[in-house]
Amino acid sequence: MKPPYPLKDIAFQAGLSLATVDRAVHQRPGVRQTTRLRIDAAIAELDRQYAQSGLAGRRFVIDIVMETPQRFSNAVRAAFEAELAGMRPAAFSARFHVAETMSERDLITILKSIRRRGSHGVVLKVPATPAMSEMAGSLLEAGIPVVTLVTDLPAVVRTGYVGMDNHVAGATAAYLLGRMAGTLPGKVLVALSSAHFAGEEERERGFRL
């Protein structure tokens, strides 16, 4: 029987390990009756919390807009689809707008369409250009949360950023390369996939410093 909530949520509410909850929910041996009662109580409490939150039965749609290689967009799509399926009791779905290369005009058209149609949130992986910052800001003004993914836009035009610290990543690469090269003189080639993404620029700057 499929559990009514993600196992990690049940485990957190019950104060038990994820492995213990997994064994109990799937009726495996080695789980005490008192533990099962704690899990039942945790599920009942989650029922109460979700009922009070008003999420039950609600449907949320988010938009993912990315200019990125297909291997990365495939990984992001798979991750979103796996996670959104478990975000009960509300129903989440995602609309993907992805391509390896997109003109700024195409991106603006997509974002204007999202603003006009409405969305519960937008995830962006786009070049850090003034036009993209302006469009992100217009989404915020329309009450649509904006989250940048792995490459950032100015903080004033987005709700949050998800990804590594690209400056630190560049500095770490320089440190490791220096350790491998030792005292030998030489030249280092720094290659970027694009000069228009803030993440690439931050990694290069971190590497050079």
Image (tube, rainbow, N blue to C red):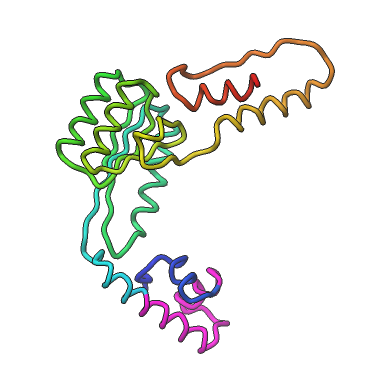
Quadrant assignment for the N terminus: bottom left
Tell me residue 66's x, y (percent).
35, 31
Horizontal side of 194 relative to 123 (left or right) equals right
Query: How many discs appear?
Result: 0
- The residue depicted at 26 percent of the width and 41 percent of the height is 95
Q: Is residue 198 above or below residue 26?
A: above
Q: Quadrant of residue 99?
A: top left
Whether the magenta-drawn stretch holds residue 23 is answered as: yes
Give whichever of 72, 160 is nearer the camera: 160
Quadrant assignment for the C terminus: top right
Q: Is residue 117 above or below residue 100?
A: below
Residue furthest bottom in the image: 33
Give whichever of 191, 29 is nearer the camera: 191
Q: Quadrant of residue 102?
A: top left
- The residue depicted at 37 percent of the width and 68 percent of the height is 5
Whether the magenta-drawn stretch holds residue 55 is answered as: no
Which segment is the magenta one? 17-45
Residue furthest front in the image: 156
Q: Main secondary structure of the magenta part?
A: helix
Give whichever of 29, 130 is nearer the camera: 130
- The residue depicted at 25 percent of the width and 36 percent of the height is 139
Tell me residue 96's x, y (percent).
29, 38
Tell me residue 12's x, y (percent).
49, 70
Tell me residue 9's x, y (percent).
44, 67
Horizontal side of 50 relative to 15 (left or right) equals left
